[in-house]
Amino acid sequence: MREDAKQRKAHVDRAGKLSVVRQCELLDIHRSGIYYGPRGESPQNLELMRLIDGKNLLHPWLGVPRITTWLQKDMGLAINKKRIERLFRLMGLSATGPKPNTSKRGKGELHRIYKYLLKNLKVERCGQVWAADITYIPVQGGYLYLCAIIDLYSRYVVGWSLSNTMTSDWCRKTLETAIAEHGAPEILNTDQGSQFTAHEFCNWATAPEQGIRLSMDGKGRALDNIFVERLWRSVKYEHVYLFPADNGLQCYRGLEEYFRYYNSERRHQSLNDETPSTIYQQGKRKAA
């Protein structure tokens, strides 16, 4: 019913011939909902979220009590535990590692969980395994969510997108764009977040025309998707925190330039000091 109400509100035309009051009566919705705009987080909470996110990337084992103590003792902030608990829930963080909102496990018949397939698997070619995840990105006066997909063999970012809301449709479209450009992987690994466990995402990914085998991290095992977690650390400490964006457009353009640098210029010790783009292209030529 909530979704139906939202859809009906979209049909209200403030410039139409009928008054807003009459339109609301005809659509069976309350007039107050037309004028209400959701309140964003306060500047202080946004700053706290940025501090918590940075600390959690470096020390993912810290939970609410120790983060609260750190903010109080080391940062000199008069913050109580309940406030940090709420921000942890908002950001989806846990003491086992950074988890965005989408890491909340989906429940019911509309969600399915797949077995973790990467245990003892030797990743030895491009396109064998991709990993997808979502993280929180602060911007001036608010925050966005970033979805990225990485090829595990080459560390090449095959696709990414920004959104201010998180849906399985958004994740599916990000994957769809990556497949259109690079072809489908053999295995796609994700966490058990509700966007990835939704039938809309799973049914599309595992359809015969894609032929993808889905793999999902074990519940509470933050290190299963360690390569994406390392990507988030690089993105945030090498770009996001150094060049804070004033708005969504600036955030998008900055990330676009960073991912170009990450793929084509940033050398990785684990790749024998080669760039992801070099390893990815070499792998593609071998497979051709």
Image (tube, helix red, strand yellow):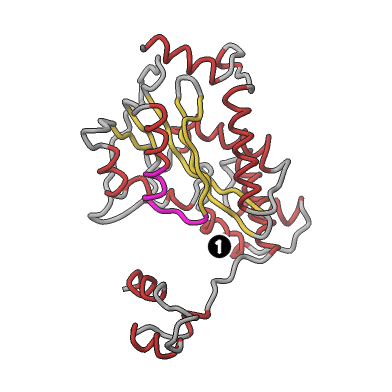
Q: Is residue 60 above or below residue 120?
A: below
Quarter assignment of residue 211: top left
Quarter of the N terminus within the rendering: bottom left
Q: Name which residue type carries label 1.
A: Arg
- Outermost residue on the right side: it is 76
Reading the image, the residue beneath label 1 is: 86
- Magenta residue check for 269: no
**Stretch of the chain drawn in magenta:** 164-173
Q: Position of residue 4 (x, y in %)?
A: 32, 72
> At 65% from the left edge and 41% from the top edge, which residue is drawn?
254
> At 78% from the left edge and 57% from the top edge, which residue is drawn?
76
Q: Position of residue 229 (x, y in %)?
A: 53, 35
Q: Position of residue 217 (x, y in %)?
A: 38, 37
Quarter assignment of residue 78: bottom right
> At 42% from the left edge and 32% from the top edge, which residue is drawn?
131
Quarter of the C terminus within the rendering: top left
Q: Is residue 264 left or right of residue 190?
A: right
- Most foreground residue, 35 or 106: 35
> At 40% from the left edge and 27% from the top edge, which residue is drawn?
182
Main SS of residues in magenta: helix
